[in-house]
Amino acid sequence: MSVAIDVVGGKWKLHLMWVLGEGPVRFGQIRRLLDGVSEKVLAENLRQLEAVGIVHREIFPEVPPRVEYSLTPLGQTLNEALRPLEEWGDRHRNELLCDPRTLTAAS
């Protein structure tokens, strides 16, 4: 489990996996979908996921250049592995957000 956590750890990587799971997306689209992420942090997280083979970055030879990000086959298998975690969160969202002991209740 520690290998997987090392790959997707941090505030934004799981969110990125969710966005990229829908198909190829441009940087600006990702930024709009992930409210609150800075351009610097987004670029850094995308580079980290690309470096470990989870994200593919494709540059199209156009003027201006178009860049799209997508999950690699390895990234797709990781996204599938994360799906039960998403389902668990959906099932327990209300009780977790209503419990004053949870940190997410303040956000």
Image: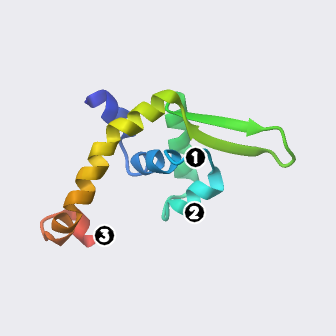
Marks 1 and 2 sit apart, C-alpha to C-alpha, by: 14 Å
Q: Can residue 53 be spotted in the picture?
A: no
Q: Is residue 47 left or right of residue 67?
A: left
Marks 2 and 3 sit apart, C-alpha to C-alpha, by: 19 Å
Residues at discs 1 and 2 in contact (Cβ within 8 Å) = no
Residues at discs 2 and 3 in contact (Cβ within 8 Å) = no
Label 2's element? helix
Classify mark 3: residues with Cα within 10 Å, few (<14), some (14-19) or many (20+).
few
Q: Amino acid at mark 3?
A: Ser
Label 3's element? loop
Residues at discs 3 and 1 in contact (Cβ within 8 Å) = no
Q: Earlier in the sequence, mark 1 or mark 2?
A: 2
Q: Is residue 53 above or below residue 94?
A: above
Q: Amino acid at mark 2?
A: Arg
Which residue: 13% across, 69% down?
99
Q: Which quadrant of the figure contains the C terminus? A: bottom left
Which residue: 57% across, 51% down?
40
What x and y, as percent, mark residue 4?
33, 32
Q: Is residue 106 left or right of residue 8?
A: left
Which residue: 80% across, 45% down?
65
Asked which quadrant contains residue 7, the reply is: top left
The residue tagged 3 is 107
Q: Is residue 98 left or right of residue 69?
A: left
What x and y, as percent, mark residue 25?
61, 49
Tag on residue 32? Answer: 2
Q: How many marks?
A: 3
